[in-house]
Amino acid sequence: MDPDGRLCELGQEGPVWNLAGTNGRFQPRRQCVVPEGRHLLLPIINMASYQTGEDVTCEELQAGAAINNDYLVSAVVLLDGQPLGDMRLHRVKSEGCFHMDPDDDDSRLAAADGYWVMLKPLTPGRHTVSVGANYGAPEGGAYSQMRQTFEYVLHVGGRTQITLVTPRMLEASAP
């Protein structure tokens, strides 16, 4: 739900920097400072299915998470304006189900399914990552026609500054 990237650093630890997607209801443009040398995990479009009752099986949760992903219409990721290839090759499903709180065996079970891409660490400086994806499941339902569009401006290694050089500045620096 972060509209502009102000929460980008929240909970970030380890060698992978996790970028957030959306719930499909808004189109954020986020700015983030990413430490140098971090891989980036980018959600393209995905679903999670959560246990709501005692009698829901893991198989039912997995089917609920998969239903829209079986009907991916399009998925495009651009890095600095260049497409990263066929995103259909990047579908990942949870192996079985998992507890929402890994430290609590009594917490709700969930399953996840979707399209993700892991990017190698980017060179220091400013980079733009743009994502657009949508489902087209024929059954209808809350997320069957979901569209996800978002953009990140990433400042790898620290925020980059752009300095405007004017002709007067050039004249002043000439020998």
Image: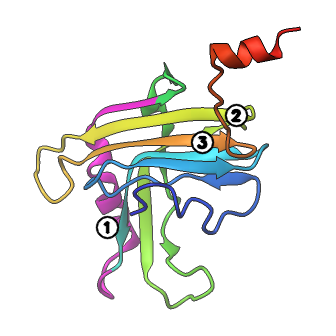
Name the N-terminal-most of marks 2 and 3.
2
Secondary structure of the residue carrying tag 1 is: helix
Query: Residue 72 colored magenta?
Result: yes
Residue 62: horizontal and vertical position, in percent?
Answer: 37, 61
- Horizontal side of 136 relative to 43 (left or right) equals left
Residue 47: horizontal and vertical position, in percent?
Answer: 36, 57
Q: Amino acid at mark 1?
A: Glu
Q: Amino acid at mark 3?
A: Leu
Q: Which mark is residue 154?
A: 3
Q: CA distance from mark 1 to mark 3?
A: 38 Å
User: Can you identify the residue that label 1 sits on?
Assistant: 60
Name the image quarter holding the C terminus.
top right
- Out of 57 and 78, give the one closest to the viewer: 78
Q: Say which of marks 1 and 3 sits in front.
A: 3
Secondary structure of the residue carrying tag 2 is: strand
Q: CA distance from mark 1 to mark 2?
A: 45 Å
Residue drawn 58% across the image and 89% down it: 104
User: Can you identify the residue that label 2 sits on?
Assistant: 125
Name the N-terminal-most of marks 1 and 2.
1
Q: Residues within 10 Å of mark 1 (few under 14, many from 20)?
A: some
